[in-house]
Structures are given as structure tokens and as C-alpha cells.
Amino acid sequence: MGNAVVSGCELLRSIAADTGGTAARALGALTAPIRIQIVGRAGVGRTTVARLLAAAGLGDVTESGAVDAPGSADPELDGDVVVHVLSGPARTPDLETLRRAPREVTVALVNKADLQPSWATALVVAAECEAETDVVTLPIVGADDVGPEPDGRADALAAVAAAVEVARARRSCAALAAIAQGAARGPEREVLEQYLRSDEAVRLAVRAADAAGTGAGGRRRRTLAARRAQVRAW
């Protein structure tokens, strides 16, 4: 949805150039990069996962300080998307972090899955974390210098990409709400009302509703069902 949003705002871009104000702020929110925040305890491979996501071009990837670090407060979960990295079964600090994270835009990755006794074990570890937190959790081998497949990277990148879509959808909804508020009063009222009636605004609203609602939810349910079947198969 990200590229579609950026390339699908030509009318709003034109209005923003002419009037500034509400339209310019909405355009800025819609086209700004999605910030993917990497969190986790020390030693779990946050930097490795950050490099992988950055290379995939999914958003503006930033690595926060370690969770449960002695003498330091846990990082605030303020990313558009939160990726929590583990390196084994979830510990209390992991569970506490994931329970306070925004569900639909959070993904947990069990890194160093190659160090588990088997890939089946890694899948079980991920499933147990997901059951505890209701956050999509996947095993992954983030390092490059390891053995053959499976490495879980494709599934992990797909899960983060889905969270990015939801984050974009939320921005779109907020931007359209701000435009509607501006259309209710102020000097830009007429042009903003016209924009809200435009095909561009309708397409933006439909894409946002699909990503934030039944589209994302349906994809998530199908992904979970497939993963549970994979666990049983192993």
C-alpha cells in the first residue's frame, strides 16, 4: 500500500501546493516513511534483524536500546511498526513488552532459530510466544553465514510488510479525518470538500479500510492457520 499511497495522491499534492495548511500536513503524513522500531533484550540479534529489514526496503528501520537492560528504562514503543526480537522462548521482559505493544502493527521474531534443536522446535517456541501475547510470532535465521533452508526470512518479511500496510492504513484514516475536519471550517473548506468527494479520496479510503480491516485480518488468519498446520506437519 505504501507505494500506492505515495503515487496516488496527485490531486492532494496539487491542492497542498496551492493552499498549504491542512492539505500539506495530510500529504506529509501520508508520504512520510514508516518507522520500523526494532526492540528486544541484549544479545538477541537486534542489529542483524534491523539490517535484514532495512535491506528489504520496508521502511525507516531504527534500533532501540535493549529491553530489560540493568540501570536503564525500557524503550518507549513509539514506532509505526514494532518488531520485537527474541533468541529463544519468551522471558518475562519479552512478554511484558509484547503485551504493551500495539497488536496489529507488532511482529515478534525468534531469531537464531538455527540454534534450536530443530526447525520444528523453533516453530513451537514461536507458537507459544504468540499464544501468550496474541502477537504474530515467527522463527527466523537472521545471520547470513549459517546452513541451508529453512531460514524463515520470507515469512518474517511478509509479516512485517503486512504490519507496515496496517500502519499506512491508519495514517490514511487519520489524514482523511483531518481533511474532513478542515473541510468543516476554515478558509480551505470548499477545496477540501471537493477533495473528499474526489475519486482519489475514495480510493484512498477503500485501500485504507482493506488494509486496516478485513483485508489484513483475513491475511493474518490465513497465515496463522498455515503456520499451525506447518507445526503439526513437523
Image (cartoon, helix red, strand yellow):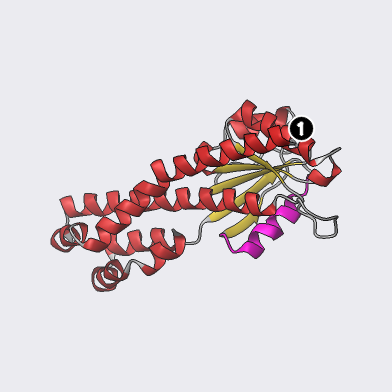
- Please give left or right for residue 10 compared with residue 58 in the image: left
Which residue bears the numbered disc 1?
89
Tally of numbered discs: 1
Side (left or right) of 112 relative to 12: right
Residue 137 placement (x, y as % from top left): 64, 39
Q: Is residue 192 left or right of residue 16?
A: left
Residue 167 percent coordinates (x, y): 47, 49
Q: Which residues are magenta?
A: 44-58
Three-letter amino acid code of the residue under disc 1: Pro
Along the viewing direction, whichever of 50 and 115 lies nearer the viewer: 115
Identified at 66% across, 64% down, the residue is 55
| Residue 54 position by quadrant | bottom right
Please determine whether, in this image, residue 10 is positioned above or below residue 60.
below
The spot of residue 215 in percent (x, y) is 42, 45
Q: Residue at x 76, y 32 (%)?
A: 89
Query: Outermost residue, front direction?
Result: 233
Picture coordinates of residue 149, whole percent (x, y): 78, 53
